[in-house]
Amino acid sequence: MIMDVTEIQKIIPHRYPFLLLDRVTEIKENEYLIGYKNITIGDNVFQGHFPGHPIYPGVMILEGMAQAGGILAFKSMGDMTEEEAASKVVYFMSIDGAKFRNPVKPGDKLEYRVSVLKNKGSIWVLDGKAFVDDVLVSQAELKAMIVDK
């Protein structure tokens, strides 16, 4: 299954400049999701992080990872209609063990690989990893809950 940015926006409420996932390339419900964001010098964050030495902020990597995890959780909740999805939102409860291994720079393709560690009802525990050219750049354990808006 492939989801472009238009399909992604039907599931999560984020919009430019805070939509941090360009495409979902693979998803297996209740198991894993693979998606990516193309990092460009045109991203607003590079105006201040850091002029002359652009590095994509770690907090943005974690947010993109969380957005990918939110899509995985939504898609794993069964055959939810667009209307049902629009009435719900994913709240992240915790991000644990976050690590940043390598800097991410303009021109990189930041690939998110998120897998389900545990699910009980509306609570999801996810293992998130981010890669550039198959090199691990960041990782974290994410806990989220899907709730009515």
Image: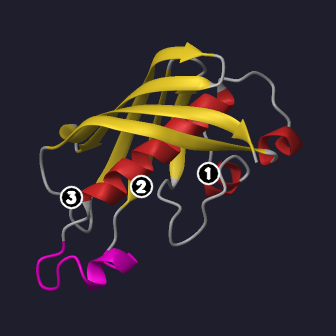
**Marked residue nearer the N-terminal end (2 or 1):** 1
Disc number lying in front (3 or 1): 3
**Marked residue nearer the N-terminal end (3 or 1):** 1
Q: Count of labels shown?
A: 3
Mark 2 residue type: Lys
Q: Mark 2, residues whose alpha carbon is within 10 Å: few (<14), some, or many (≥20)?
A: some
Q: CA distance from mark 3 to mark 1?
A: 22 Å
- In the image, the segment drawn in magenta is 41-54
Residue positioned most to the front: 93
Q: CA distance from mark 2 to mark 3?
A: 11 Å
- Secondary structure at numbered mark 3: loop
Residue behind mark 2: 37
Q: CA distance from mark 2 to mark 1?
A: 11 Å
Residue 135: x %, y % from top left: 17, 39
Mark 1 residue type: Asp
- Secondary structure at numbered mark 2: strand
Q: Does residue 60 lie above or below 87 as drawn?
A: below
> Mostly what secondary structure, the magenta segment?
loop
Q: Mark 1, residues whose alpha carbon is within 10 Å: few (<14), some, or many (≥20)?
A: few
Residue 123: x %, y % from top left: 58, 24
* Left or right of 26 in this view: 62: left
Residue 75: x %, y % from top left: 67, 30
Is residue 138 or residue 132 the one in the foreground? 138
Displayed quadrant of residue 50: bottom left
Give the residue drawn at x 66%, y 56%: 13
Mark 3 residue type: Val
Quadrant where the N terminus sits is top right
Residue 20: x %, y % from top left: 47, 58
Residue behind mark 1: 4
